Image (tube, helix red, strand yellow):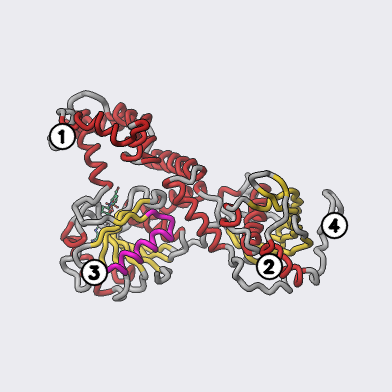
Amino acid sequence: MKSIQKAGVVGGGVIGAAWAARFAENGIDTVVFDPAPDAQRKLDEVVALADRAYAKLTLAPRAKKGAITLTTDLAEAVKDADFIQEAAPERLELKQDLFAEIEGHARADVIIASSTSGFKPTDLQAKMVHPERLIVGHPFNPVYLLPLVEIIAGEKKSDDVTASAKAFYASIGMHPLLIRKEIDAFVADRLMEALWREALWLVKDDIATAEEIDDAIRFGCGLRWAQMGTFQVFNVAGGEAGMRHFMAQFGPALKWPWTKLMDTPEMDDALIEKIAVQCEEQSEGLSIRDLERIRDNNLIAIMQALKTQKWGAGQTLLDYEAQLYKRSHSGSSETVHDFSQLIRMHETVVQPDWTDYNNHMNEARYLQVFCDSTDAFLNMIGVDPDYVAGGHSYYTVETHIQHLQEVAALEPLYVKTQMISHDEKRIHLFQWIYHGKTDEVLATGEQMFLHVDANASKACPAKPEVLARLGEIWDGHQHLPAPEAAGRAVGQRRS
Ligand SMILES: NC(=O)c1ccc[n+]([C@@H]2O[C@H](COP(=O)([O-])OP(=O)(O)OC[C@H]3O[C@@H](n4cnc5c(N)ncnc54)[C@H](O)[C@@H]3O)[C@@H](O)[C@H]2O)c1
């Protein structure tokens, strides 16, 4: 996949602004085209929401943010873009005209993805000269958090385009789902619409209120859906005989007149008013922005919980974090380093929620930065995720941090590492956190790590290839001057 450095987003509303936030979060400079006079305010609000959400979502070193620029000139948004995401209003002709115009300004090799909720890509391609470069990349609100993006190709298609789009979306923390055939409204929206249709009837017929219907989802099936979907949940519900038993038991019910799925209630003013009033009562004075923050907090908590289980959207988050660590750690066991020098591998930025009441990075985050740097070091000597999955790892057994200078939110940091000693079970490291702009030393950290058999929870010698790599480092580092603060006691006066 060609590296995507710059993106163009066409339409900066709910969806377009959130695409811009996700792109910028991943270091991609993004130009947004939107003709509306209040577009900048809306864009800024969504970007702030996304920033807040990412700070909570992950401790992994986030990429240096890409710039987001708003323009009212379409050509400006797309002419230098490596990837174009359209998120304009859901009107077929408007989108068709936009794609024809975008093609006139964009580079010929650039993918154009539409966020449409329902139009088939073949219809969207109608006025294009190179229709195969257009796909649907259908996201879900909030786009900066939810991983799913449905990819749909039209009759004129290119496998390269779909494969590249898939790789790109995966690289920015998403779960691309390639839809096998083009149909209106794709997969997820069809499922949501079926539920929505049924829910509207239940309100109209006074069976339940909006709140009661939401309760029926969020206290029960919704919790199941978030982690297993519908088929796997029913497979489990079938007991030992699984889906076969489930279908034998509940299959006949599908023929009973349970559902009103094929009818639509008349969307007259009375029904719209009834539902709107019930929804306002349900939210009890919370604004839409309040609800967005609550929604984001809950989504983050769910994804983090699923991460501990290495499951579904949690696995996607885990994979994304692995990419973030890799990007910020300039080294692997294959990287050639000059071991006659200190090793510099880890860089990061002080996140706004890493600070204390003085707006200075708090003590725990110094330790985290040292540990992230140690992870980069371990990766470099071959103690990577595969090695850890094999049941061996290094555990931290001792830490001494000196806090020398404060550092505020959003300041850049980097870490240098020196190996003080090692043997077949132990590594003794000394590290310095530097300010990324002034090169001032902010803190030093001295740590001892013990190689363990994680299953037995006992120290054991590291594997020969790891010891060999440590030997290479030692060949260089034994000639470096010992750090002045190495081995110092707590409270000892500085010379
Ligand atoms: N809202 C959702 O939950 C959701 C989810 C997935 C996909 N989508 C799809 O994303 C697209 C955008 O939806 P939205 O919810 O962000 O709508 P929105 O109304 O919030 O945003 C649309 C934006 O497009 C701008 N615009 C108007 N005319 C334009 C033009 N000619 N060119 C470019 N921009 C123009 C508007 O000023 C507005 O800011 C639609 O195709 C929609 O179906 C929406």
Residue in front for this viewpoint, 172 or 376? 376
Nearer the observer: mark 1 or 2; the answer is 2
Q: Are marks 1 and 2 in contact (CB under 8 Å)?
A: no
Residue at point 64%, 52% (across, down): 392
- How far is disc 2 from disc 4 in space, using C-alphas? 25 Å
- How far is disc 4 from disc 1 in space, using C-alphas? 76 Å
Q: Magenta region's main secondary structure? A: helix
Q: Is residue 234 visible?
A: yes
For badge 2, the amino acid type reads Ile
- Residue 56's x, y, as percent? 51, 46
In the picture provided, is 458 more to the left or to the right than 349? right
Nearer the observer: mark 4 or 1; the answer is 4
The disc, 4 or 3, on the residue closer to the chain's N-terminal end is 3
What residue did someone put label 3 on? Answer: 132
- How far is disc 4 from disc 3 in space, using C-alphas? 67 Å
What residue did someone put label 1 on? Answer: 269
Determine whether the residue tagged by mark 1 lies in a helix, strand or loop: helix
The disc, 2 or 4, on the residue closer to the chain's N-terminal end is 2
The disc, 1 or 2, on the residue closer to the chain's N-terminal end is 1
Point out the image quarter for the N terminus.
bottom left
Nearer the observer: mark 2 or 4; the answer is 2
Determine whether the residue tagged by mark 4 lies in a helix, strand or loop: loop
State ligand 1's quadrant.
bottom left
In the picture provided, is 183 more to the left or to the right than 11? left
What residue did someone put label 2 on? Answer: 343
Residue at point 87%, 60% (across, down): 495
Is residue 169 in the magenta section? yes
- Residue 325's x, y, as percent? 55, 59
What residue did someone put label 4 on? Answer: 494
